[in-house]
Amino acid sequence: MRKRLGVILGLLIAVVLLAATAQAGTRGTKVANVTLAGWSSGPDEDALLNQVINVFNKTHPSIHAQFTVINGDYPTAMTARFAAHTPPDVFYVDSSVAGAWAQQGVLQPLNSFIKSSKYDTSAFFPSLLGAFTVGKSIYGFPKDWSPLALEINKGMLGQAGGKAPKTWAQLQSVAQTMANKNVVPGGKPICLSPDWARMLAFVYQAGGSLTNITSPAAAAAVNFYVGLMNKGLATTPDKLGSGWCGEALGKGKAAMIMEGNWLLPFMKSTYPSVQYGIFPMVKDKTGGNLAFTVSYSMAKDTSNKAAAWTLLSWLTSRQGQTIWMSKGLALPSRKDVKAIGGRQAFLSAAPYAHGWGFGNPHFASAYTVMNNDLTAVIAGSKSVAAMLADIASALKG
Amino acid sequence: MATASQAAPALRSSMLGVRLREAGWGYGFVAVPIVVFGLFFIYPFGYALYISFFHWGILGKQGGAEGTFNYSAVLHDPIFHIALKNIAEYTIGVVPLEMALGLSLALVINQKIRGRNFVRSAFYFPSIASSVAITTIALYIFNSDGLFNRIIGSHTPWFHNAGTVLWAIVGLNAWTTSGTVMLYYLAGLQAISTDVYEAAALDNTSAWRTFWKITFPLLRPAHFFVLVVFGIGALKLFDQAFIVGGGSGGPNNSTQTPVLYIYRDAFSNFDFGKAAAAGIVLFVIIFVLTLVQRMTVGRQEAA
């Protein structure tokens, strides 16, 4: 018995020693290890990102970048890492939390790096870069983005005249035609999420903005959006037996929905037989859209800022982003990188799109208030004015 | 004899050694859980109390005010009031339902019926399944065109309607936890001496009367235990509310619970000081309620 214990102990010591020497070996070659972290958006995207990183590692022999997927609730998992002072060097930041993270002091402002390496930031769409800018400090470069577009079931649109709506009035009249002809049996012409991440686009179309949310334009947009539901032309996805509007489109329970680029892979994998067209978002007084974007940002708590900057700036460079866009999984955040075909309806929104998150440190918490109040407004238990006042105060923190 | 009396002092001293050694072992065994308890309960509790008096962000203490401002912010927050109202409604709804279901199941299982072990396992099964998985599946079953609505011929989205969602969670949790409550009641039932039932049988007492006059009062320790443990559990509702409302407490704050409120303050608003203050407030509420229960329902146990 004692002999066997001795053998096991010996083996254990050998393993520990081996591991230690192996680690010392990698350190000896003076390669800077940089960790890159994000969430997984499916096997296709993970494979593509690893392909991008392989190119980086080959062209930058002194740096070794490695991608790790953080599973589960990403912002919560990252908060724990920030608090423990062990964040990854470079990581994804969703535009909705960028302002709050910047205010908490966990993101590295990139201005000094931009200046010293003469990095050209003018290639990024300004609204996307703006989502990661607080004051004059830039806290990340957008890696890709998606606005909203109007997706319509082709067969159902054909029965309603075949012309995609371009304005609020046309949206309502096409929906009315669909309702009159019962084009969507068992469903509704439009699926509308009870979500400010959709409705806020209408606020911008009406000439309003989040910073001036108590304006008459904002109230008009809410009244139009909720009015479509009250008129029986639209409803929320849960009433259509769906988790979100994309599912309602797939199930044939809605003819028109407003979703982003993320709809395309979903429809392809889940409802490949459904024929739908992608059209630009409707307009009212002006064009208005939201830009959902994610940045590559650097941790303030990293010991290897130079290498992290090299990785971050290369990933968002023209070269890095061109590889990232090669499969058309996302839209380029740079004007000098081309998107693959069929994305025109999305790309046309770039001049009107407002970065979701707006660099406001209180945005993530205000967003919860916004949606809770919106469900109350839809249910008729809260007035539009009271909701807008709530939001204005929540945005102030 | 002489040898025995000579050996006595030696024996006594060795007895002392044994007792010391035993005490040493005893404290040794107790020390481990005490250290674990201190490390994972006492220390975090003290730390939470400490940070509840400051502005506390991801990276620790921030400048600005110190004192009880987090407590007044929590106590004056209308959302926290909604959370308290929701959790009160939920607890008052779910605990009696759990007790009634669990007791009924225990009474059935306690009979000499065939396949008793199978039935007992079947009733207990929901308690061991993951609450996240159960809630996710329930979302589909109670969808507007889900199984449940097909059966009753309705289109109510039970988990998406501000008026029904809390009661849907009550029903769901009463079902999942009734198996555990059943086990406690079963233990209680089996602790009741058969003598009293024999006496009742001799007096020709009806089954109904036997239950209300003998079984139910003698189950008092089980009632108290279930009420306290499951009452506290209900006040700490989080996972089902988190999944149903997507973490937002929606629709219209109808799934807002105190623990969800704490979670959102900490991990969405990064206001760890206020989250800690809300946690302390919740602790005080639960502590006081448990004391009240102990003084009323648990009177005999305390004596």
Image (spheres, grey):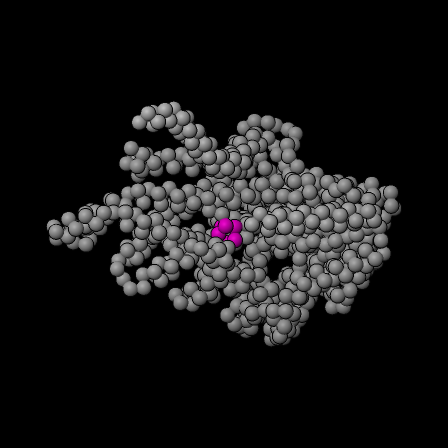
Left or right side of B265 for A162 = right
Which of A301/B156 is in front?
A: A301
- Residue B267 spot, x, y in % from top left: 59, 43
Left or right side of B221 for B288 = right
Q: Is residue A395 above or below residue B6?
A: below
What residue is rendered at 74% in x and 59% in y? A49
Left or right side of A124 for B128 = left
- Residue A308 spot, x, y in % from top left: 78, 47
Which of A255/A160 is in front?
A: A255
Outermost residue, front side = B2
Outermost residue, left side = B203
What residue is rendered at 44% in x and 55% in y? B128
What residue is rendered at 48% in x and 52% in y? B240
Q: Is residue A316 visible?
A: no
Residue B132 is a magenta residue? no
Q: Is residue A275 visible?
A: yes
Residue B206, located in which quarter of the rendered image?
bottom left
Q: Which span is picked out in magenta?
A: B239-244
Residue B240 is a magenta residue? yes
Q: Quadrant of the C terminus of chain A?
A: top right
What residue is rendered at 44% in x and 66% in y? B147
- Residue A293 spot, x, y in % from top left: 71, 53
Count of marks overlaid on the render: 0
Residue A338, located in which quarter of the rendered image?
bottom right
Which of A82/B251 is in front?
A: A82
Magenta portion: prevailing SS class: helix
Residue A274, located in which quarter of the rendered image?
bottom right
